[in-house]
Image (cartoon, helix red, strand yellow):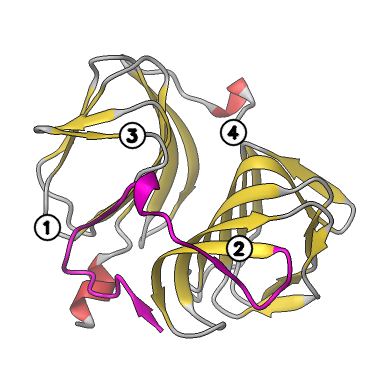
Amino acid sequence: MLINHDFTRRVTVATDDYHWVHSPQGGVDRVMLDRIGGEQARATSLVRYLPKTSFPYHVHPGGEEILVLDGRFSEGERDYPAGWYLRSPPGSSHQPHSTNGTLLFVKLGQMSKGENNALRIDTRDGANWQKGEGISTCPLFENACESVCLLRMASGTLLVEPSLPGGAELLLLQGCLIEGNSIHAEGSWIRIPAGQRLAFIAEKDNTLLYLKKGHLGAMQELQ
């Protein structure tokens, strides 16, 4: 299966573009944002668990990255409410479930082989944030291949990078972003190829976004 697989092209998916499809696991639906492969895929998705849904025990050969957007996600006896960031390295395994339902942003099969450590970060804990002028940052992960963070922007603040050597990917979690004559609303997913420019203005206070940079250059080199 190929969905938005040309990483040399910019992609924007707004909430009006969401197409929910059933997964093979009952009670789990997905919006496939990009995908290369079948059920063992390199994939970026929004994933929705209905209440009292569970997955069987399984392994992620290429690792898994999760941001809990709504509800409560669970692994074994540990619960992760909205705002938690989970990063599980290649070869990790788990048996996820949700008692009351949850909405997740999930990236599969996109980690480097040298990554070995699991991360669990509560992004709603103020101690995990670094305050800046107009933009506060919650660092989530960084290595030679990529950097991942949440950004909270004050109204009118400009987020700009003239050139992105490794590209960028954004998920707008709260608020609106202005880009030229366009307005990106809450829930928008934007993928910017390597070498292109990033320039957004926060329309509202407390605009919140997930931002990953650096990881798309290698994908473009394969194409």
Whichever of callouts 2 and 3 sits on the residue coming sooner in the sequence is: 2
Is 21 one of the magenta-colored residues?
yes
Q: Which residue is mark 1?
A: 195
Q: Are marks 3 and 1 in contact (CB under 8 Å)?
A: no
Secondary structure type for disc 3 = loop
Q: Which residue is mark 2?
A: 29
Relative to 110, say whether 206 is above or below: above
Q: Are marks 2 and 3 in contact (CB under 8 Å)?
A: no
Q: Which residue is mark 3?
A: 185
Q: Position of residue 180 (x, y in %)?
A: 9, 33
Q: Is residue 28 left or right of residue 32?
A: right
Number of the front mark, 3 or 1: 3
Numbered tag placed on residue 123 in the rendering: 4
* Mark 2 and mark 4: Cα distance apart in space: 25 Å
Q: Quadrant of the C terminus?
A: bottom left
Question: Few, some or many C-alpha atoms within 10 Å of disc 1 (few <14, some 14-19, many ≥20)?
Answer: some
* Mark 3 and mark 1: Cα distance apart in space: 24 Å
Q: Are marks 1 and 4 in contact (CB under 8 Å)?
A: no
Q: Is residue 219 left or right of residue 161?
A: right
